[in-house]
Amino acid sequence: MSNAAHRAAAFVLFILFAAYGLEALTIPLFPGQEQEPFKPRTLPVALAAVGMLLMLIRILRLYRSAGTEAGPGIAGFRWAPAALLCVAMLAYGFLMVPLGFVLATTLFLTVGFAILGERRRGVLLFLPVVFSLAFFLLMTEGLGLYLAPGAWFGL
Amino acid sequence: MWEGISTGFSTVFMPVNLLLVACGCIAGTFIGMLPGLGPISAIALMIPITYGFDPASGMILMAGVYYGAIFGGSTSSILVNAPGVAGTVATSFDGYPMAMQGKAGKALAIAAVASFAGGTIGALLLMLAAPALAVVSLSFQSPDYLMLMILGLTAVSAFASRGNVLSALIATVIGLMLATVGTDPSAGIQRFTFGSLDLVDGIGFLLLAMATFALSEALMSVLKGDDRTGRAVAAGRDIGSLKIDREAAGQMVPVVARSSVLGFFVGVLPGAGATIASFLAYGMERALATAKDQLEFGKGSVRGLAAPETANNAACTGSFVPLLTLGIPGSGTTAVMLGALISYGVQPGPQLYQNNPDVFWAVIISMYIGNVILLILNLPLIPYIARLLALPRQLLVPLILFFSLAGVYLVSFNTFDIFMMTGFAAAAIFLRLFGYPMAPLILGFILGGMMEDNLQRTLTLYDGSLAFLWERPVSLGISVLIVLVILTPIVRTLWARAS
């Protein structure tokens, strides 16, 4: 990872710390609370100040050092499957209520297996269904948890 | 104390709890062997399962998982030179060369026996140290606790990241910031919720632990295209004899005695933990060895393998001392355990020893039982557990993602948690890529609430003054330690530059 990338990341974090600090200053107080030694915004403001100070030190150190910094190199990283898995997780969350646990889980696992290169149709179609049903039965019958069948099926 | 020990034994020896220790050890070994997943992920994955358990049973399962995960990490270090956790890196120095010589079974047996001995001696020391410290810590007040928490956080940053102190401190601050999201405990005012009802109760610790460890580690393995399971299976097929010959046993005895004591005391220190203990023990044994024996180190030395294995297990036990007696975790793993205890309604600290002796002693005794089970059950099962890893990565990763997401969803039944987990996992990957460690972040998050409580009490008690820093001897002593902890890496760096 290049020094410039580390500097950019440090700047992003510095901005986040600053935004957190600004938001902390807007935390409402009850009347008379301003005079108290401890307020709901005391720790957040202190943390924002410490965070910004640490980030400034890091940024200055990054400008002084010419070499690369700690952290794994990213050459050869497989970004596409990782990003697609993140999208699949978000979709899993969106589909959980309308489709229900079993169908949403089956879809998530099928898509997850496919994203990572599984091409055997038997595995893609059979395994997620069996796994989701088994897990559903274990939770509902075994542990007594109620898992909604899905809004579409409840209509 | 003897009454407590007998209570602990009777709790642990209940058939259901024995079964839980055994299941925990096996599950922990399996998860610990998986590339990228360490004890923190293993324990976090177990928390949703243990929600319905009583606290003692839950902690017994987790202690088994902890030991199992460390042993699993050692197994992958020995078989495939891929340490699952930082604490078993030193194990690979001599364990892997031994496996390459066709003595994988012997290396695994040495690792198991050394772990057993280290854990057992550690558990005995814990039995003596924990009650004594618990009695002393009853005199601690809010200012002392506040300073202790700051010491824990700075120590984890100073020691855990080996030279990358600033990044670790930044990660700690991020964790503390995340802990402030939700309703303020003192006045009931909402902070950083942006009007969202889902954030009113704050961010769940399990959610954050799963996202920053289990999810992000699984996704990192996808990013790196990491596939060590094939090698693990190949290595697991023929591991040779599990026997330790008399010569090796003779070499191990003094090493185990020295390394277990060293490991335990290093483990007690906040932030030091299993990694530093294992490297220190390895270094110590190398320094104590004769010139001829020193040449063996790195080429399959029995002493070089036994020392870090003993020390890391003893350190794991030692790390429970501050957790159980002060309620302050000294490592990422014990921080996750603290979160689990709080979710069971048990507050660790000096009161735990008095109010919940069954939990206190059951955890200590279960460590010993866990070591016995690891030795008699896991070791013979290793070739079979290694074969279980034949599950290809394209199936394994989505299943890990599913278990992590479902583990959190089945507790809250709120799909917003799945979105938050995905966001935190992406953020964790970003931070990891730029060298910001996750353990200080989760420790900061878990200690954040308690730290704010103690800060509030301290400032109210002293009317906003910082006089407690010099008026209370305990606080003063801890403050001096904090300064030393901060200065140590700076002095070390300056020293290295000068020489």
Image (tube, rainbow, N blue to C red):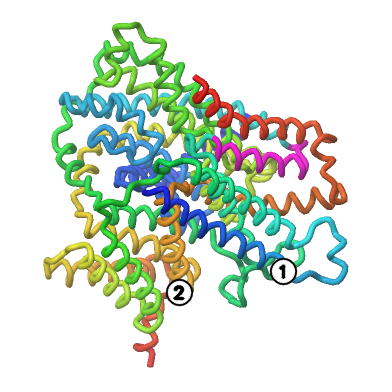
Q: Nearer the viewer, mark 1 or mark 2?
A: 1
For the point 33% across and 29% down, the residue is B91
Give the chain letter at badge 1. A
User: Where residue A115 sits: x, y (%)?
Assistant: 23, 66
* Left or right: where B49 falls relative to B358: left
Task: Determine crowd level at label 2: few under 14, some 14-19, many 20+ residues with C-alpha closer than 10 A.
Answer: many
Give the chain letter at badge 2. B
> To which quarter of the image does residue A87 belong?
bottom left
For the point 34% across and 25% down, the residue is B113
For the point 86% across and 47% down, the residue is B462
Residue to which mark 1 is pinned: A27
Please check the rendered image and state whether residue B337 is part of the magenta-colored stretch, yes or no: no
Q: Secondary structure at mark 2?
A: helix
Question: Which amino acid, mark 2?
Answer: Thr
Is label 1 in contact with label 2 (beta carbons under 8 Å)?
no
User: Where residue A60 sits: x, y (%)?
Assistant: 55, 46
Gap between marks 1 and 2 measured at Cα: 28 Å
Q: In the orientation shown, which residue stands out farthest toward the bottom?
A: A155
User: Where residue B214 sits: x, y (%)?
Assistant: 39, 54
The magenta stretch is B138-158
For the point 31% across and 15% down, the residue is B249
* Left or right: where B461 falls relative to B310: right
Residue to which mark 2 is pinned: B415
Nearest the eye: A71 or B385: A71
Please check the rendered image and state whether residue B154 is part of the magenta-colored stretch, yes or no: yes
Which is the main secondary structure of the residues drawn in magenta?
helix
